[in-house]
Structure formats: structure tokens, C-alpha cells
Amino acid sequence: MGDLFFDLGNFAVNQSLNEEQCKLLLHQYFGEVRAADLAHLHLMRLGSDLRESFWGFLQLGISELDFNYHDYAHHHLNRFLRNVATPQFEQWLQDVRA
């Protein structure tokens, strides 16, 4: 999508990386872990889930494949909604602005 952190966030969310693993990913990639980078990674994890949910809902209407796009879309949407409802979400927004 043109944003390095989108690819990192997409990887982190789809591999179910925990906080320490996210920090390790950033450390391996950049050589350090900055609060703004960690926040950017987490926000792009959210962006990845939102994109995947939209894609799944679109596929419900157009795909001819025998795949449960309903559950796929709702899985990603529900994970997105759970994560934006956490106290960390506001902190990520603050940290990424810093």
C-alpha cells in the first residue's frame, strides 16, 4: 500500500505477534524500537484487519469460490473493533503523532 508500516503491520497481525514479538520485529528491521514506530505498527495492524474485512464483504457479493467469506470478513472486522476499543488505541494515536 506504499507504507512500509502497512507491510509490517500486516505481517504482525497475520502472524498473531504479541507485543514483545512486535518490538523484536521492529528492532530487527530498524535496529531500534521507537514508541512512534511501535504505535505506527499497531495502527497498521488495524488497517490490515479493516482492509481484509472490506475485501471479505466484497467477496460475499462477487466471488464464485466455495469459501466462507462471511466468517472471514467478520473475523477481521471483530478483531479490528476489539482493538480500537482498547485503551492502547488512544496511546498509539498519541505516540504516532509525536
Image: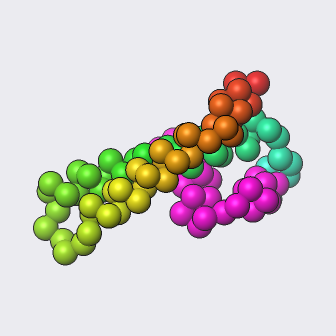
Examine the rendered structure and indicate whether residue 86 appears above or below residue 28: above
In the foreground, 8 or 56? 56
**Main SS class of the magenta portion in the image:** helix
Left or right placement of residue 72 versus residue 39 in this view: left
Q: Residue at x 75, y 62 (%)?
A: 21
Is 88 situated left or right of 15 in this image? Answer: right
Asked whether 67 or 5 is in front, the reply is: 67
Task: Residue 94 in the image: state x and y as whole percent.
Answer: 71, 27
Residue 25 seen in this snapshot: no
Is-magenta flag for residue 11? yes
Magenta stretch in the rendered image: 1-27
Residue 19 lies in what quarter of the image?
bottom right
* Quarter that holds the C terminus: top right
Q: Is residue 65 visible?
A: yes
Q: Is residue 96 left or right of residue 68?
A: right
Name the residue nearer the viewer: 28 or 74: 74
Tell me where residue 68 appears, x and y as whole percent: 26, 69
Res 61 quadrant in image: bottom left
Q: Residue at x 83, y 47 (%)?
A: 33
Residue 46 left/right relative to 88: left
Task: Judge whether residue 86 is colored magenta.
Answer: no
**Residue visible at 17% across and 62% down?**
63
